[in-house]
Amino acid sequence: MAKEETAKTKEAKKPAAKAVRHVVPFPEPQNVAIENVWPAVDDGRFSIRREPGDVVEVKADVFRHSHEKIAADVLYRRLGEKKWRRAPMSFVDNDLWAGSFVVDEIGYWEYTVEARTVSPEDVPSRADRVYELRVDPVYARCCAWYEMFPRSQGKVPGKSATWDDCRERLDDVCAMGFDTVYLTPIHPIGQTNKKGPNNSLHARPEDPGCPYAVGNTKGGWGDGGSKDLERTLGTPEQFRAFMAEAKRRGLRMALDVALNCSPDHPHVQTHPEWYFHEADGSIKFAENPPKKYEDIYPYDYFNENWKALWAEIRDMILHWVDQGFVCFRIDNPHTKPFQFWEWLIREVKLIHPEVVFLAEAFTRPKIMKRLAKVGFDMSYTYFTWRNEKQELEEYLRELTGEPLAETMRGIFFPTTPDIHPKILWNAPREAFMVRLMLAATTNSAYGMYNGFELCENEPFPGGIKDELANSEKYDFKVRDWNKPGNIKAFVARLNAIRRENPAMAEYTNLRFHYADNPQITCYSKRDAKTGNTMLFVVNLDPYHIQSAWCSFDMEALGLPSWGAWQVEDQLTGERYTWEGNRAFVKLDPKKSVGHALRIL
Amino acid sequence: MAKEETAKTKEAKKPAAKAVRHVVPFPEPQNVAIENVWPAVDDGRFSIRREPGDVVEVKADVFRHSHEKIAADVLYRRLGEKKWRRAPMSFVDNDLWAGSFVVDEIGYWEYTVEARTVSPEDVPSRADRVYELRVDPVYARCCAWYEMFPRSQGKVPGKSATWDDCRERLDDVCAMGFDTVYLTPIHPIGQTNKKGPNNSLHARPEDPGCPYAVGNTKGGWGDGGSKDLERTLGTPEQFRAFMAEAKRRGLRMALDVALNCSPDHPHVQTHPEWYFHEADGSIKFAENPPKKYEDIYPYDYFNENWKALWAEIRDMILHWVDQGFVCFRIDNPHTKPFQFWEWLIREVKLIHPEVVFLAEAFTRPKIMKRLAKVGFDMSYTYFTWRNEKQELEEYLRELTGEPLAETMRGIFFPTTPDIHPKILWNAPREAFMVRLMLAATTNSAYGMYNGFELCENEPFPGGIKDELANSEKYDFKVRDWNKPGNIKAFVARLNAIRRENPAMAEYTNLRFHYADNPQITCYSKRDAKTGNTMLFVVNLDPYHIQSAWCSFDMEALGLPSWGAWQVEDQLTGERYTWEGNRAFVKLDPKKSVGHALRIL
């Protein structure tokens, strides 16, 4: 009641009502209200994502005052088209209406909802805003990347491999069934403050340095910057022959983009204003606490001459597009402004809608989500650290469900040059098989870092960080790619299963089923159009035999809830006949880390 | 894989990339991202609602790229003020920040979120939009209305009461403890096609007609329209004496606004273009299927001369504000355009922010919600039809919770002139007491229609609709306001409990507790500032003794989970000592339909 007194006191104090009349503008007449247009990301601030061939379902609450009959349409068009195309919406329930249209070309689209009174016919009412839809290439959702460290593809210890060595490795990449080759940075490597083996601060002259310290005016064939090639990898002609061979084999090429400059990068000389400066005028090196990168200078994206810097980076991307790269894996995008990415990605995609950007951000969830919203096609995820059944299933449900999947497509890498998770420290090959099977069969997009097929498992000295020992990031490395114990056949079989089953190409069709053992996870993927359905049962424990009773969501499998059904393991060829919605499964990791069952 | 082929085909077809560069405008630099500003209704399309003295808590996801420290403020101001006021936000968790400010005056306010990098200091980043907040009078949330049918307040059968009779009834209204008197329409009543008793189509000349058929050029003191008074209720001087007496007693006055014209309304002659027309040029009468209203013409809100109509209706409201009405109960707002309400309510409130609008809409949920969003302060609800425990508790949780309570304040009327629910057909006084206790103690805003205190229970002839028999809407009615069996003392006690306990003034503080009998509902309201806590246990069965074990949410009651506590029934004065979080309650409706317990 005290509040009411306050209100009264205030009212008494206010000046006598002025004779101000008609201060609110009259509206544009609209008889129909349109609310809650869906799908929409942040009420239309960011575009939703689809792939060619997708049916875009649009829903909205549509209603008017009084009882007159109404009709509603989805309006849609390619960005830049003047005329809207129309798809009729139909009434669902409780003032909800729904309609759909098919997107057939990659690039930017727009959609909105329009409604009108049918009788008497009136002006069409429009939703408050136009929503954007970006249709990305199918390979932004369905792909298998092989991450190649170019200088480690050779045979001579203590020496860099060349593009010819890389070209020879394409046999292996194709035999394993990958469709994308992703190269870590290929530019001249800085020498000033270069890192030695195991990231040590003092390198010997013969150490090659880290390729993420980009730029060396003396190390390339041109200006030594981000459009140039590291000289020790071979000539530009060799590079072009490598790219041509990859293209001939139908492989997509992905390039690692590290927007860092070594102190030897030509921009440091030509554009010192593009960097941060210490009080004494010297250029600041990079930090990403607790990590320090003494060998690289970050750009200042809002320096006095920032527009020239942004244009230069765009031109660098377009240069590599012209050289044959279609995917760009961006190193640490979360240390650059979101606005920069929103501008850059749109700028590139308006010219080359086939180009795909992958965000290498391992940071806080909302930052990763924002990077997806501002335009990245794909994103690294926390998959590497999700090992227990419950955390794995929860995370996968979040990633592949609403609202996250409207903008973000996760790609699963079991390891990276920066991350060798504890679960693989000194672990047996079965542990590598479990993690690869999870990556390749839960997700339509996954990747494998070279060396994983050899089950490289030695942790960083002293276990002080989650990296491999003697990382090729700071050293030359020569491997026996056919070393006994390798899992290349298993990798090849997984990739074959992915290709042969349309259900594996979809991202949001993952469904989990109940298994009564915390070491056994059970999930399925189904393609509604073809009916193709894959059911997986994986033993998360690479050391012991585990068994479980599984209870299946039969609707998710496209099966009746009773009767017998048959499955065929695509890894072993074995067939099983199961009855009703339960089955007993026993997995010995020495024989099989999991079942990859096609429902017959 | 079929999709991928489609994509490739399309890519092949597209023209060679044009050398278009730099087509995306450079942004205004902002280092900090601000997302999910809360509270917000439809992403800020509509204003949120508060009352004076309220602390407005604002939350947002605030973060930037890289690792620099950031700070954030809530910006707020009265609408029209140039300068923003600031309240600092603090970090909560997972990039969520929160801050708050107090609103001290009714009217329109604005708020948004601003954030900046602390070191190096940079330009402030702003949220994408400014959000609106409307601070309404406290009586938009906390009030007890008495609905008075003016012509039925007299003593002479077959004759209309006068304003003098109404004035005499104010003793009763005040004795029962109501704070608002709400009058059904008081304007000249149309005679053409007027309705007879029980809504019959053929009235006798001596029948008074329905006051919702507004306007009679021969029936008032002026033009006979919506600014005029029905002549049979007495002179304008008598009316003013009634209004003055109500004001002297501190009662707020509410007026029923029926935007319908009888064929005798002066506008029918002066503005025939304001109505819908049949093909033959005659004016259409109103329909609200399945109901037909042959005695009234609806306005066409988008007629060729619509702006003049809207201005006329606004002037009519302002006229009655000048006469002393502060609340307007709008009849059937859902049959008029939402845009009209949004315009009208804003127009009136910018001049008279103390004016409150109540939507009498019993229609589909999304339409009722939209009326609240476009500006109505209060709304009728489905309370009348929520009688079973589960449906009652579910509905009350929805009404008083997020997101609905951001815009909609429900007011509970157990009955109205149009609705006499089945649960009260031929029901005993205990049934009336149960429904009134539920209305008055679950909700801070409630109202009672005159005659309810006399437990009028006779259904419409043949039970063909949920209305009272012999409704005063179509007839003269004389009542004995002190008829034996009345529940006036119970009404007075409930209103006293509402006044004496600050917890009863709040709308969103309702919490339900578990009771193991479906006929017993248990709920509490607590005022955090004073600690005042009321606990209610109500027997929904007016016919039988019911008992239950109640299990209390002790935190909601502000009590520790163990130990003894004492309560005092504010209806009977009895005290009980309870132990821990469970208690046994037995209610005999003949003695008490419920407990209204203050925690001591």
Image: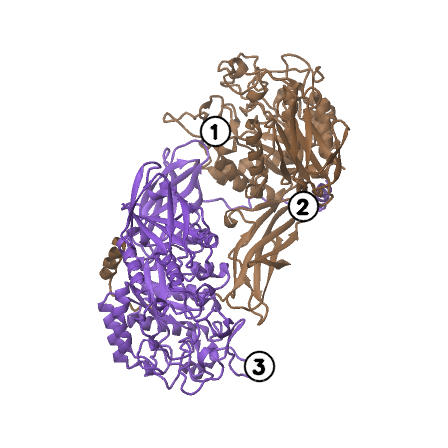
Chain colours: A brown, B purple
Q: Quadrant of residue A545?
A: top right
Residue B222 makes an appearance in the image: no
* Residue furthest out toward the bottom: B205
Q: Secondary structure at mark 1?
A: strand
Give me the residue at 57% from left, 21% from top: A423
Q: Secondary structure at mark 3?
A: loop
- The percent coordinates of residue B239 (x first, y second) are 28, 77
Residue under pointer 2: A52
Residue under pointer 1: A298
Q: Quadrant of residue A312?
A: top right
Give me the residue at 59% from left, 68% from top: A118
Give me the residue at 62% from left, 38% from top: A356
Q: Nearer the viewer, residue A463 or B531?
A: B531
Amino acid type, callout 3: Ala
Q: So how many labels did they put on this image?
A: 3
Please tell me how crowded label 1 is: few (under 14), some (14-19), or many (20+) other residues with Cα within 10 Å.
many
Judge if badges 2 and 3 mark residues of a common chain: no
Query: Residue B343 vs residue B571: left or right?
Result: right
Q: Which one is in front in this view, the residue at disc 3 or the one at disc 1?
A: 3
Chain bearing mark 2: A
Amino acid type, callout 2: Pro
Q: Nearer the viewer, residue A223 or A291?
A: A291
Please tell me how crowded label 3 is: few (under 14), some (14-19), or many (20+) other residues with Cα within 10 Å.
few
Which image quarter is the N terminus of chain A in?
bottom left
Q: How far apart in space, not on screen, are marks 2 and 3 (Cα)?
A: 51 Å
Please tell me how crowded label 2 is: few (under 14), some (14-19), or many (20+) other residues with Cα within 10 Å.
many
Judge if badges 2 and 1 mark residues of a common chain: yes
Residue B233 makes an appearance in the image: yes
Give me the residue at 39% from left, 71% from top: B257
Residue under pointer 3: B279
Which image quarter is the C terminus of chain A in?
top right
Whether the residues at callouts 2 and 1 have beta carbons within 8 Å, the answer is no
